[in-house]
Amino acid sequence: MHESRVRAFGVLTPAPGGPRVTVSVDALRLERDDAGRVTGSLRSTEPLGQEAAKHTGLLLAETAARAGTGDGGLQSAVATVREWRDADGKLLERRTELLARVETAGGPVLFGTAGNGEPLATAEDLPWHELAAPAGSTAGDGPPADWRERPLVLRPSPAAVLVAGTAFSLTSRGGRDTAHRLAGRRVLPSLTLRDLPTTPSAHAQDDLGGPAQPRTLVDDGRIRPPAPLREGIPVGRAVWDHDSGACAPPPLARLELLGPDLPLPSHAVELVRCVEGLQRYHADGTVRLQCLARVTERPGAWFTVVLRGKPVHLLRRARGLTGPPTAVHSDSDVTTRSLVLAGAAELEGTGHAVVTVNNP
C-alpha cells in the first residue's frame, strides 16, 4: 500500500514594498506493509504540492489584508497546509495551521488557529476584533477595587496554555508515572481532557499500525491511565519522519477540553490574550501568563493581569466553560471554550497561585 503526503509551509514578513511571502513544499510518497506500518518514504517528483502551495500563499495574503484593517501591526505570519492523498492522488483530507504575531499597545500577541477544510477560511477564524481595543484605550485608573473577588474568565487563547500544560503533566515521561499512580482519582472538577489523533479521519491507524483513536486523559475530573507505548510512542500517535527514516511522536498535540456550561459572569475579569516574549513554562512545572485583560462591564478599558501557578492546581478551581468552542494553534492545537476560574483571592488562598495586576 502507498499514499502521499504534502506539506506546504509559508512565511510572511512585512517589507517596504508590501508583504513578502515565501512558500516551500515537501511531498512524500509513503509505503505501508500489510499491518499498516509505514516502512519507507520517497520525495515525490509529481506536482502534488501545487494546490497546497497556492492555498498557503493566498492564506498569508488574506492574513496581511485583514491585519492591515486593524490598529495593530502585523510582525509576521506562518501558515502550513497539509494534505493526505491516497494511491491515486485523491485528496483525503486537508488541514491548515495559521499563526500571526501582531504588535498591540499592550505588547506583541500571537493569533493562531487550525482546522480542516477550506484553507482561506482559516484567516476568518482569527479574532481580529480583539486587536483594536487594546490599542484604542486603556484603564488609566486600573481595574475596579473588587477585582480580586471577581471570577477570572480565561478566553480560549490563555485557557489553551493551561490545557496544554495539564496534558504535558500527564503524558511526559514523569507525568505518565503520575497518571498511573493517580488513575481513577478525582483531581479536577467536572472537566474532561481528550487527546485527539493527528492522523486524518480517513485513517484508522497511525504510522506504526496502531489504532488512531481519541484518548481521554481526564474523564469528568478523574485521571485515566495513560496510553500504552509502542517503540516509546503512545499507541495511535506515531508519525513517520522522512529525514530520520523512523516514527516519532507528533510535533504538536491536539487536545480538547470539555466541561459544564456556564453563562458568562456579569462581573468578571476577562483574560483575553497573552502577551508574547516572556517565558511561560518553567522548570518547576508552573506557568506564567501575562494577559491583556478587562472587566465585563467596561470592555474598552484594558489593563494587564499576571497569573502564575501550576496548570493542574489552577484547573482545580475551574467553575465551568462559557462561550463557543475555539481552535487555538500555537505550541499545541487546543479546542476549548472560555474557562471560568475562581477569583484571584480564592486562587491565592489555596497557596498554589499568584495573581497581580499591572497597568499598561
Image: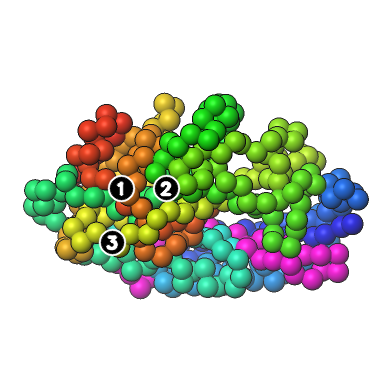
The residue labelled by disc 3 is: 264
Q: Is residue 13 visible?
A: no
| CB-based contact (under 8 Å), mark 1 and mark 3 | no
Q: Identify the magenta region.
A: 68-95
CA separation in Å, label 2 and label 1: 13 Å
- Which dot marks residue 190? 2
The answer to whether residue 177 is left or right of residue 315 is right
Q: Nearer the viewer, residue 13 or 133?
A: 133
Residue at 31%, 36% (x, y): give it: 308
Q: Neighbour class for label 1 at 10 Å: few (<14), some, many (≥20)? A: many
The answer to whether residue 263 is left or right of residue 188 is left
Tell me the amino acid under the disc marked 3: Leu
Verify whether residue 70 appears in magenta: yes
Mark 2 vs mark 3: give the one in front. 2
CA separation in Å, label 2 and label 3: 18 Å
Image position, residue 198 (x, y; %): 65, 53
Residue at 20%, 61% (x, y): give it: 266
